[in-house]
Amino acid sequence: MPDLPAHQLPPPNRTVFFVSDGTGITAETFGHSVLTQFELRFKEVRLPFIDTLDKAYDAVRDINQAFEHDGKRPIVFSTLVKAELSSVVRQSKGMHMDLIQTFVEPLEQELGVKSTHTIGRSHNIADSDEYKNRIEAINFSLAHDDGQSNQNLAAADVILVGVSRSGKTPTSLYLAMQYGVKAANYPLIPDDFERNKLPSALLSYKKKLFGLSIAPDRLAEVRNERRPGSKYAAMEQCRYEVNEAEKMMRREGIRCVSSTAKSIEEIATMILQEIKSDKRAY
């Protein structure tokens, strides 16, 4: 669907529910992957922590109300582990996509082993080492955001470089939160281009550098939201900074990707491939 201002977008075609006895993130992630294949707009409703019969019946009521309001069956992505809760929700007037029933039951038959049917097992705090690593990575990325600190850069798994507002901060935090990657980020500024060299703090870590670029018109749009009408947001300034940053990265042999038309997930995956990380998503 083309990018339009919010007031020009057509109304949502359907209501979609993400129902879970946990946070609902798994159902939502899977649902989004499927729904992006359709050029339609959806009203999304997350129903997390549906872990009692009373809450399950409340979910049925919400789904049925959406059916009455829309005149179309809501789409329900469910990761309810307990069969009795799933059975209740399936009584609603929705079109059900049950991830547990679809994938776990066939695996039980194939493996010859019953699943534990444990709620929230994928996020069990028992995975304490992984949890600690993720928290440590988040703290590292926050401490090394936008060149705030040059200390301990040797501990970074990757250092993102690029002009201001090219997507370094959200990518760094995504890598930390999802993969436990210690990602620092450092801005390239006009002073660096005038000196025609990388910031001195980065010279010892060139092998860790990964560049983010962005189309000048998109950069101007983003910067105008932050500082409208400023030189910082002017198209001429954006074009100059992007061109100089890309020249510097080519000259220094820094791997680089444009963030203009890529999601954070795509950028993160490309970075993980480049740094040969064996970290898995949490």
Image (cartoon, helix red, strand yellow):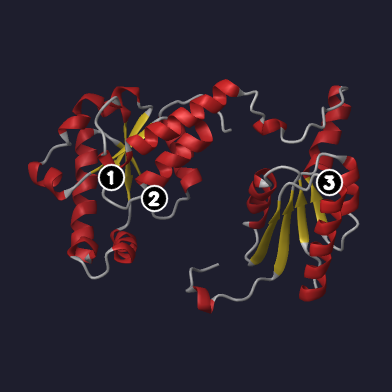
Q: Quadrant of the C terminus?
A: top right
Q: Which residue lies under the disc numbered 1?
A: 162
Q: Secondary structure at mark 2?
A: loop
Q: Residue at x 56, y 29 (%)?
A: 280
Residue 155 falls in image quadrant: top left
Q: Which residue lies under the disc numbered 3?
A: 52
- In the picture, measured across the screen, residue 137 lies left or right of residue 216, that is right
| Cβ atoms at labels 1 and 2 below 8 Å apart | yes
Percent coordinates x, y for residue 46 in the rendering = 69, 55
Q: Is residue 208 above or below residue 57?
A: above
Q: Residue at x 84, y 23 (%)?
A: 111
User: How far apart are labels 2 and 3 at the CA level?
Assistant: 43 Å
- The first of marks 3 and 1 along the sequence is 3
Foreground tag (3 vs 1): 3
The one nearer the camera, 123 or 154, is 123
Q: Residue at x 27, y 51 (%)?
A: 164
Circle 3: is it few (<14), some (14-19), or many (20+) Cα within 10 Å?
few
- In the picture, measured across the screen, residue 98 lies left or right of residue 147, that is right
Direction bottom: furthest residue: 8
- The first of marks 1 and 2 along the sequence is 1
Asked whether residue 273 is in view, the answer is: no
Mark 2 is on which residue type? Answer: Ser
- The first of marks 2 and 3 along the sequence is 3
User: How far apart are labels 1 and 2 at the CA level?
Assistant: 10 Å
Q: Which residue lies under the disc numbered 2?
A: 259
Circle 1: is it few (<14), some (14-19), or many (20+) Cα within 10 Å?
many
Question: What is the total number of numbered labels drawn onto the structure image?
Answer: 3
Mark 3 is on which residue type? Answer: Thr
